[in-house]
Image (cartoon, rainbow, N blue to C red):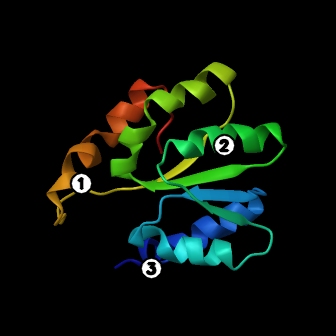
Amino acid sequence: MRASAQNWPDQVFRLVKDHNISTVATVPDAGLARLLELCRADAGIRVITLSSEEEGIGLGLGTWLGHGRLLLCMQSSGTGNCINALALPAVTQSPCLMLVTMRGEADETNPWQVPMGRAARPVLQAMNVACF
């Protein structure tokens, strides 16, 4: 594995700190474990565990209205849960920063991850979410 691919959680954590993100919301996922560990260990970051990913969309708006910044972390299968909720940042013109770990790709062993894994980017783009 390339060093940059291996260290992405550390790189993302540095960006979280550099951009004064005070809250991280997530539905726990093994792929996010290292990043969430780093965030939980930092007294300046509050990690909130969600029941479902779409809760993070409203939480993001509330955090922004309270002059904070939120990062919503989820796996690609969770993006399907957010589609209607994404109207909220679109209509309010508020930020909605999401980190989506991809599932359903070549080596996927769980067939339930494949459909949304394939559809995540086009579905988000259809909701006018910029994807990088």
Question: Which residue does the numbered mark 3 point to in the structure image?
Answer: 3
Which picture quadrant has residue 89? top right
* Distance in Å between CA atoms under marks 2 and 1: 25 Å
Which numbered mark, 3 or 2, is in the foreground of this view?
A: 2
Q: Secondary structure at mark 3?
A: helix
Q: Residues within 10 Å of mark 1 (few under 14, many from 20)?
A: some
Q: Amino acid at mark 3?
A: Ala
Image depth: mark 1 or mark 3 in front:
1
Residue 95 image label: none
Q: To which residue does mark 1 refer?
A: 113
Q: Residue 31: x percent and y percent?
A: 41, 69
Q: Amino acid at mark 2?
A: Gly
Can you identify the residue that label 2 sits on? Answer: 60
When the figure is inspected, residue 25 is found, relative to residue 65, above or below; the finding is below
Q: Residue at x 48, y 48 (%)?
A: 53
Which amino acid type is shown beneath numbered disc 1? Gln
Q: Quadrant of residue 61?
A: top right
